[in-house]
């Protein structure tokens, strides 16, 4: 399966670091920018276009919208089965720009990620309203930062309340895709750009992520 | 001391819930919108203007900029000693709009909040670049979500790496204001709009927050 990943969090592009390719640059070919290959993923992010990773993207909406349009249309994605778009939180320029850029393609839907507490589910409720307004199907809701299992005593603590994601799914008639616990090993892997799924295939966190991914994949129309 | 709080996170306004006043509405007077009073704070947030808290703010940059301008100039703040502006992460429309709105006032500076891991300090490095470009003084850096003390065994775990905030401060020549641990009691208070500082005055988290607040206050010019 050919998968593209498009990071449209222009002010906080984190995917390149998480995948261990933050030092890469993108090049131009006749068909446009050539995305960076990581294993079998093709990745595009604004961080590949910055000379210095500390450069601030002090851009207003219209400029952001233009760049995201280019990311969709002027990148040599090749033949993709799936394009995964990682957006910042919210319901604003980036989200509208992605939908506009993808107008001529079939959008399968949105996976919404929340943390358990109400300050976060409140934001995601507004994102659900956004999806309804713009006709984007909701593939499901993921709860991130669910419970923390202490590595010293194995007791679980709900640092950020609990159950908010599942409750939100019920309330809004969305599918609940599952939860990802707070796991220091996952944070460490993300931090160092190491492949968590390869390093810890027997962890509970692996199995949560795997289940969520499988559920999303089987829910996509062929 | 008269303090105003302006929440300009238009897509994720969380301050009203954290202060337990999410159900309030703002009214108009001759001098503009009357902010909501919580104890001795005057608070303004977009969530007071929404009929339904689930309403999505599907606004592009220019509309956001206009509203934030109104929040600064058309709110009957009265005589304030300090106006605290809570922005979303990033370096975009909201940040530019606040600075523009405050052009005629003296801006004391920015308090930057990061979590310990590099994906977050990277974002804050870009915010530092933004402050330098726009001439905003950096009052200091706070590290949030630092270490978690297990309530069952009292052992501390650095869930999201450790020391990133202090290191960032050193690297960028900024003042390090301190860290706030992951504390389930703090999350719970925020969730329920209860006053954490009143409820848990003897906790380590209270003392961290207090130290940070005191340091910021004493660094402000009279």
Image (tube, coloured by chain):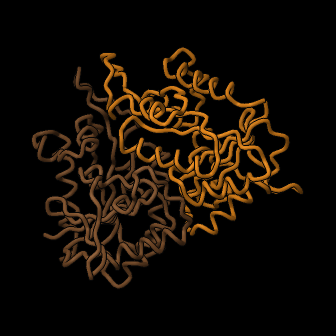
Chain colours: A brown, B orange
Q: Where residue B26 sits in the image (x, y, percent)?
A: 74, 53
Q: Quadrant of the N terminus of chain A?
A: bottom left
Above or below A165: residue A188: above
- Whether residue B95 is visible: yes
Above or below A78: residue B109: above
- Whether residue A174 is visible: no
Query: Residue at 48% of width from left, 32% of height from top?
Result: B169
Specify whether B132 is left or right of A24: right
Q: Where residue A50 sits in the image (x, y, percent)?
A: 40, 59
Above or below B165: residue A124: below
Q: Residue furthest bottom?
A: A104
Query: Residue at 26% of width from left, 44% of height from top?
Result: A190
Q: Residue furthest front?
A: A51
Q: Quadrant of residue A204?
A: top left
Specify whether B31 is left or right of A150: right
Q: Where residue B52 sits in the image (x, y, percent)?
A: 59, 60
Q: Quadrant of the C terminus of chain A?
A: bottom left
Specify whether A104 is left or right of A121: left
Query: Residue at 10% of width from left, 40% of height from top?
Result: A202
Specify whether A20 is left or right of A14: left
Query: Residue at 67% of width from left, 53% of height from top?
Result: B98
Q: Quadrant of residue A32?
A: bottom left
Q: Where residue B25 sits in the image (x, y, percent)?
A: 71, 52
Q: Residue furthest right?
A: B30
Nearer to us in this view, B146 or A175: B146
Above or below B208: residue B24: below
């Amino acid at each position: 399966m050919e998968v593209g990943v498009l990071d449209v969090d222009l002010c906080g592009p984190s995917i390149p670091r998480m995948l261990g390719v933050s030092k890469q640059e993108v090049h131009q070919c006749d068909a446009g920018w050539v995305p960076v290959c990581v294993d079998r993923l093709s990745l595009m992010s604004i961080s590949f276009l910055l000379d210095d990773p500390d450069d601030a993207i002090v851009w207003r909406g219209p400029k952001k919208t233009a760049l995201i349009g280019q990311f969709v249309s002027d990148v040599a994605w090749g033949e993709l089965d799936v394009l995964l778009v990682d957006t910042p939180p919210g319901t604003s320029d980036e989200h509208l720009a992605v939908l506009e850029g993808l107008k001529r393609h079939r959008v399968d839907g949105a996976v919404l990620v929340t943390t358990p507490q109400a300050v976060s589910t409140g934001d995601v409720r507004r994102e659900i309203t956004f999806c309804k307004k713009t006709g984007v199907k909701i593939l499901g809701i993921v709860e991130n930062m669910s419970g923390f299992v202490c590595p010293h005593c194995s007791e679980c603590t709900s640092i950020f309340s609990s159950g908010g994601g599942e409750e939100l799914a019920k309330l809004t008639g969305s599918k609940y895709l599952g939860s990802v616990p707070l796991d220091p090993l996952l944070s460490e892997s993300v931090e160092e750009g190491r492949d968590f799924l390869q390093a810890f295939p027997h962890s509970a966190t692996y199995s949560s992520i795997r289940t969520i991914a499988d559920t999303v994949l089987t829910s996509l129309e062929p």
